[in-house]
Image: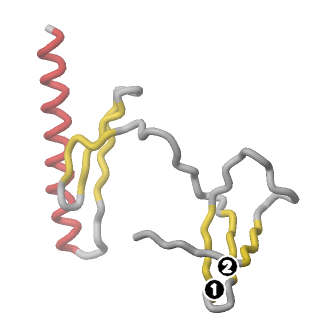
Amino acid sequence: MKTIIEACELTISHRRKYLAEDKPLAGRILVNDLDNGKATFDEWEGATVICGEPKSRRVLQGKTCSVWWNPEKERYTIRISVAPNMDAAMLSECDYEECIAYVKRKIRERHADTM
């Protein structure tokens, strides 16, 4: 989805007394009323600015799980999404086992290549 907001009055609030130039500001923009052309930007302390090339790449994608490989750190990351119900919790165990089996297989293949 692409949204263009033009001719809007933007109020920026953040932790410091002044806006630092050439430094990213992370947060969320709240559009209160487009008819009146008002919006606010609130700096969010927990936000991170994502820029540049991703350090990890997805090597396995399931319905509720994925495995990522970071070649810089030579490390796998397993991500599993779980809905708060019993069926989803049981499925997440299967997803976890599938991801671990994938990682083990890749480690074995890598180890076999070095011998």
Task: Tell me which corner region of the image, top left, top right, bottom left or bottom right, holds residue 106.
Answer: top left
Which residue is pictured at 63% across the width and 91% down the height? Answer: 35
Type of amino acid at the residue the image marks with label 1: Asn
* Count of all numbered marks drawn on residues in the image: 2
The one of 7 and 99 positioned closer to us in this rendering:
7
32 with respect to 61 (left or right): right
Whether residues under marks 1 and 2 lie with C-beta atoms below 8 angstroms apart, the answer is yes
The one of 94 and 6 positioned closer to us in this rendering:
6
In percent of width and height, residue 66 lies at 25, 50
In percent of width and height, residue 33 lies at 63, 89
104 with respect to 83 (left or right): left
In percent of width and height, residue 107 lies at 19, 26
Which residue is pictured at 31% across the width and 51% down the height? Answer: 79
Type of amino acid at the residue the image marks with label 2: Ala
Q: Quadrant of the C terminus?
A: top left
Q: Dot 1 corresponds to which residue? A: 32
The one of 26 and 113 positioned closer to us in this rendering:
26
Residue 43 position (above or below residue 87) = above
Q: Secondary structure at mark 2?
A: strand
Q: Dot 2 corresponds to which residue? A: 39
**Which residue is outermost to the bottom?**
35
